[in-house]
């Protein structure tokens, strides 16, 4: 089956039937039930959980349409964003396993099942599939090492030098002290408390409350609710408060969201990474008045340093030094259009983007000669051919041509497929 981005009904039907033979329908049904139970308890989680669980929810939609034998319902399911994601992803799974031997397939399918139940793992698996499809479509043989084996990389391309490939999906939560879901749970609890206690909104002011954590939000439910109490007290008292040594609640009259950008953040924005600012805010408003509540960690690491540390550790610990190695990083928060801006920034300024600096810091080290390149993916979908064109912004390739392992064949491995 040739899989294209333009999805036909028969393609969708074939893919659904094939994937339902590999994965029990109970898996995605149970996941959907769990998602809606969480949403019923906290409405702030709705958009986050629906997006995160789009594969499971899309498979449920397809199942209902197929079992009802309703072609119109199937068409609606396919063109719904969740159904489209599910068909697109499952089509890629079926294509990838065609490149695997029986043992590799036996290890891969349970990993896919696990990502349906634990969707935070999905970006990593999706990146591996995108990379594998690129190699497979270009005619390269591939090997998937067994987890826990001597070789801990994601893929091996056994061409004349044996390229080892390690993929890293860098999500918004990567290395963060405060993960988005937990932040939404906390903000949802505050919203409920405001409603339950009928706290006054207004007085002709827009108020802001910033919860500053020394590291992260409390792990225990009891401590989390204690912090919620303290936020409400600070709001009522119109003053800043300490919850304990690890949490400080700052109260402002005015909207701090728009004037709290640091000089470092402004520098990041000016060099092509403005999209990484993804702080969650709770706004409770009546007319033009209300309250803005946000959460910050005082121990948060710079996003660019997270990218560097992730790739540097992978180069040291996962890529074997006696073989050429390639690092591929997918920046989940970056669109193809934003990656184009980074590429154009480097073209116009003689390099200098954070991506180029991260790659150069790594490949310029004497003990990193085995790293023949670091490539950056934007977030994206599975496509059938030109995945890596610079014009589409899906990949930015930075090569280490000074490596003793370098071969020009590496640069051609991601060239667009001829029409």
Image (cartoon, grey):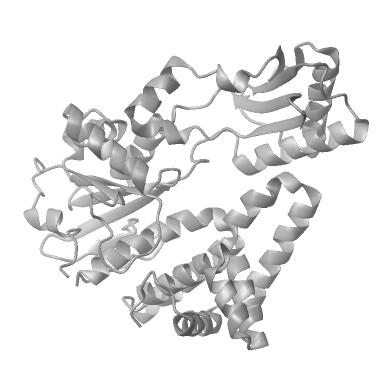
Q: Residue at x 73, y 25 (%)?
A: 288
Please provide percent x and percent y for residue 194.
Answer: 85, 31
- Left-right relation of 195 to 82: right
Q: Is residue 250 above or below residue 191?
A: above
Front residue (pair 84, 330): 84
**Residue shown at 87% from the left, 24% from the top:** 200
Q: Position of residue 317 (x, y in %)?
A: 33, 45
State whether residue 408 is above or below residue 170.
below
**Location of residue 228 in the rendering, given as x and y in whole percent from the top left corner:** 80, 29
Q: Quadrant of the N terminus?
A: bottom left
Q: Residue furthest top?
A: 239
- The answer to whether 233 is drawn above or below residue 120 in the figure is above
| Quarter-of-image position of residue 399 | top left
Which residue is at the far front?
287
Q: Tell me which residue sits at (32%, 42%) in the image.
A: 339
Left or right of 354? Residue 18 is right
Q: Left or right: 126 with respect to 367?
A: right
């Amino acid at each position: 089956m040739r899989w294209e981005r333009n999805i036909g009904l028969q393609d969708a039907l074939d893919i659904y039937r094939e994937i339902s033979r590999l994965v029990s329908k109970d898996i995605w049904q149970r996941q959907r039930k769990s998602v809606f139970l969480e949403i019923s308890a906290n409405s702030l989680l709705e958009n986050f959980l629906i997006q995160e669980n789009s594969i499971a929810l899309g498979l449920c939609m397809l199942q209902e349409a197929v079992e009802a034998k309703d072609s119109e319902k199937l068409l609606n399911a396919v063109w719904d964003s969740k159904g489209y994601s599910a068909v697109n992803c499952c089509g890629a799974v079926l294509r990838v396993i065609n490149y695997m031997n029986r043992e590799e397939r036996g290890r891969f399918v349970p990993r896919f099942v696990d990502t349906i139940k634990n969707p935070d793992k999905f970006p990593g698996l999706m990146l591996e599939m995108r990379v594998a499809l690129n190699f497979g479509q270009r005619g390269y043989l591939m090997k998937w090492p067994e987890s826990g084996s001597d070789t801990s990389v994601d893929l091996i391309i056994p061409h004349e030098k044996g390229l080892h490939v390690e993929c890293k999906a860098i999500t918004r939560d990567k290395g963060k002290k405060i993960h988005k879901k937990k932040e939404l749970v906390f903000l949802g609890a505050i919203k409920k408390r405001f409603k339950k206690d009928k706290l006054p909104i207004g007085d002709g002011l827009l108020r802001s409350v910033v919860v500053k954590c020394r590291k992260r939000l409390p792990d225990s439910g009891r401590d989390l609710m204690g912090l919620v109490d303290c936020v409400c007290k600070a709001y009522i008292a119109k003053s800043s408060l300490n919850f304990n040594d690890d949490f400080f609640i700052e109260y402002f009259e005015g909207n701090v969201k728009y004037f709290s950008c640091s000089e470092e953040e402004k520098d990041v924005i000016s060099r092509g990474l403005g999209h990484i600012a993804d702080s969650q805010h709770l706004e409770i408003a009546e007319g033009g008045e209300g309250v803005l509540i946000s959460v910050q960690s005082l121990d948060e690491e710079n996003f660019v340093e997270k990218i560097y540390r992730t790739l540097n550790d992978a180069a040291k610990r996962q890529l074997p030094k006696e073989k050429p190695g390639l690092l591929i990083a997918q920046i989940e928060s970056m669109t193809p259009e934003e990656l184009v801006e980074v590429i154009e920034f480097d073209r116009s300024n003689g390099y200098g983007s954070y991506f180029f600096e991260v790659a150069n810091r790594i490949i310029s080290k004497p003990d990193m000669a085995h790293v023949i390149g670091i490539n950056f993916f934007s977030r994206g979908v599975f496509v059938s051919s030109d995945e890596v064109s610079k014009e589409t912004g899906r990949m930015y390739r930075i090569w280490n041509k000074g490596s003793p392992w370098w071969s020009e064949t590496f640069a051609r491995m991601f060239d667009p497929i001829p029409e």
